[in-house]
Image (cartoon, helix red, strand yellow):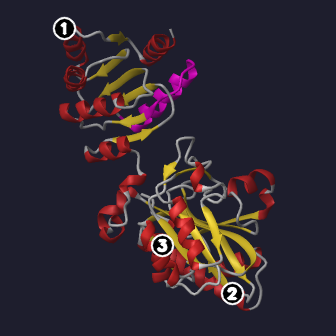
Amino acid sequence: MNIHEYQAKQLLKSYGCPVSDGRVVLKAEDAKTAAGELDGPLWVVKSQIHAGGRGKGKFKEPEAGEKGGVRLAKSVAEAAELARQMLGKTLVTHQTGPAGKQVNRIYIEDGSDISRELYLALLVDRGSSRVSVVCSTEGGMDIEEVAAHTPEKILTLTIDPAVGYMPFHGRRVAFALGLEGGQVKQMTQILGNMYRAFMDKDMEMLEINPLIVMTDGNLKLLDAKVGFDNNALYRHQDIMELRDTTEEDPKELEASKFDLNYIALDGEIGCMVNGAGLAMATMDIIKLYGAEPANFLDVGGGATKEKVTEAFKIITSDPNVKGILVNIFGGIMRCDIIAEGVIAAVKEVGLTVPLVVRLEGTNVELGKEIIKNSGLNVIAADNLADGAQKIVKAVKG
């Protein structure tokens, strides 16, 4: 689960991290009051969406202007006008895709006198099963660009969970970033507070880009991007309350209500599979035969007829889907349950695209018999390769 920048900053501030003073605006008429509560003389007006690259983004609507989703104002009136221009408009960045995201919240904060921009992040490193600290002197840039062109400017170190954060971690980061004097002590404290927040709240990503050195020599977190481990949210009601469902894909949101693991993609072949590994293999083989998957969907090992029906509804609600491949290996999951779910779903929502079903495992013959006797126009497949070839051929002609 992701949260907005202003929410991330409020959370980090509670852990003692230095951030700018700011106000969130949901309605244009409140922007002037919000800006007036800040000191100035410079105000920063920021679009709040769950995507990076806002400053370089472009609005679809001409009336929003062409200055991107992060703008500077030199008066309260100007800050209010910029907020009015951006609220309700669609911002397109390199992370949103061409559809963009609607800006429903604006964050107005005090400007900062910047001397240097740095990069700092905490991430879960699956390779080492530890929390990694990633830092770079190239703040304000996409870290992917830095990694591609100047990888030597990135330092990565891991923190042993048995020991936890130690001051030497902060000093090593400080020296790598070229900090000196009192800045080293500040960095040691900031990173320690960030690590504590990361562990306490079960984060999976905490990115500060940029971390700035101000002209007075002090450090400040100028931006913040935070993501949480969905599997741990049950023990963080305070974090759950920060969820903005308008930023989430409606299909993914609907899937979560039925405990379905669904991720929307950009392809044309919808996939319904049981098991994450088999779902990944299914997407790979679709690409191998020349098409693109429209989703990742794992119905789980204990799916019911109702869950399968809902999964089918979610797939067919995607207008990009031109064909569907059902690939089930019945171990815990019984093939006859899947067959009954598919038939119930087709009868309820209709079938306007080709459907290929591959079943294998527990009660496979019964499952095939149910589909065969359903009277539906379903293409049977003998194995995964056969199923992928048939659905790609059906879609591509």
116 lies left or right of 229: right
User: Which residue position holds label 1?
Assistant: 373
- What span is in magenta? 275-295
Classify mark 2: helix, strand or loop.
Answer: loop
Q: Nearer the viewer, mark 2 or mark 1?
A: 2
Give the Cα distance between marks 3 and 2. 29 Å
The three-letter code of the residue at mark 1 reads Asn
User: Which residue position holds label 3?
Assistant: 31
Classify mark 3: helix, strand or loop.
Answer: helix
Classify mark 1: helix, strand or loop.
Answer: loop
Residue 278 picture quarter:
top left
Examine the rendered structure and indicate whether residue 323 appears above or below residue 21: above
Label disc, if present, on residue 218 of the rendered structure: 2
- Was residue 49 drawn as part of the magenta stretch in this picture? no
Classed neighbour count for the residue bearing mark 2: other residues with Cα under 10 Å, few (<14), some (14–19), many (≥20) = some
Q: Nearer the viewer, mark 3 or mark 2?
A: 3
Give the Cα distance between marks 3 and 1. 63 Å
State the image coordinates of residue 331 (x, y, percent, origin top left). Answer: 28, 30
State the image coordinates of residue 177 (x, y, percent, origin top left). Answer: 75, 74
Residue nearer the viewer, 77 or 27: 77
Q: Earlier in the sequence, mark 3 or mark 1?
A: 3
Classed neighbour count for the residue bearing mark 1: other residues with Cα under 10 Å, few (<14), some (14–19), many (≥20) = few
Q: Earlier in the sequence, mark 3 or mark 2?
A: 3
State the image coordinates of residue 39 (x, y, percent, origin top left). Answer: 57, 87
Q: In this rendering, does residue 164 appear at all?
A: no
Classed neighbour count for the residue bearing mark 3: other residues with Cα under 10 Å, few (<14), some (14–19), many (≥20) = many
| The residue positioned farthest toward the bottom in the image shown | 182
